[in-house]
Image (cartoon, rainbow, N blue to C red):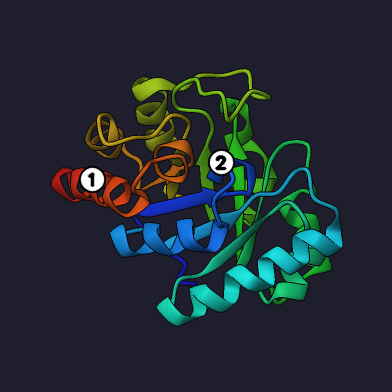
Amino acid sequence: MDNHFPYRLYLVVSEDACLGRDIIWVTEQAIKGGVDVVQLREKHLNTPDFTTSALRLKEMLDGYNVPLIINDTIAVAQASGAAGIHVGNSDTPPSKIRQLWPECGTVGYSIEYLEQLYSPEIQHSDYLGISPVFSTLTKTDTVTEWGLEGILNIRALTSKPLVAIGNMNAHNARDVIRAGADCLAVVSAICSADDPAKAAEAIRNQIEKAL
């Protein structure tokens, strides 16, 4: 991936989020609607099953030249040939990932406290996940709701690409981008939509209007 993270609509997908529908179908529809980077987040699968899912997903993504990011698990990221990995506060820190996986293309790092911006770990990450911007049922293990003001504050303190996550949808996409986010990470608004392609397109259109 390029260092400037040239992506606008970031899908975070899992079997659970797809509500029983095929994860490959949901993701492919989302790409057709404007998603340009995908993270596979499977907190409830063991490593072999997670790897199998990642390999299936990557095969489809390669056909669209869309990169795959793996949440948390280095072994799965390596085995699937993923473009990178995304980690949070309780996961392996970015500096350690760089040691364990020197050829890793991209490391994303979730920011839940403003103090994290002063951590040396920031220097080992390629983009920052701002989590969550708004409260959401898909991110229940976080303590800070950043809001638009939080994005503005973070934007003033770092030049790192910012990926906003937490109840992102077509109604708030424009405001979040204008507050300083470079990219929106979306879960439910696309994965659980009746028409994932149409849902992705609606969000992408709002992002483009904000640029």
Q: Residues within 10 Å of mark 2 (few under 14, many from 20)?
A: few
Give the image location of residue 180, x and y in percent: 32, 38
Give the image location of residue 62, x and y in percent: 50, 79
The residue type indicated by label 1 comes to Ala
Q: Residue at x 62, y 27 (%)?
A: 115
Secondary structure beneath label 2: loop
Quick one: 30 or 93, which is closer to the camera? 30
The residue type indicated by label 2 comes to Leu
Quick one: 128 or 71, which is closer to the camera? 71
Give the image location of residue 111, x and y in percent: 58, 35
Q: Which residue is mark 2?
A: 19
The residue most toward the bottom is 63
Q: Which residue is mark 1?
A: 202
Q: Residue at x 72, y 36 (%)?
A: 89
Residue 6 visible in rendering: no
Q: Is residue 12 left or right of residue 88?
A: left
Q: Residue at x 23, y 45 (%)?
A: 202
> How many labels were placed on the picture?
2
> Label 1, label 2: how many angstroms apart (C-alpha)?
21 Å
Q: Is residue 13 left or right of residue 4?
A: right
Residue 163 visible in rendering: yes
Q: Residue at x 32, y 50 (%)?
A: 200
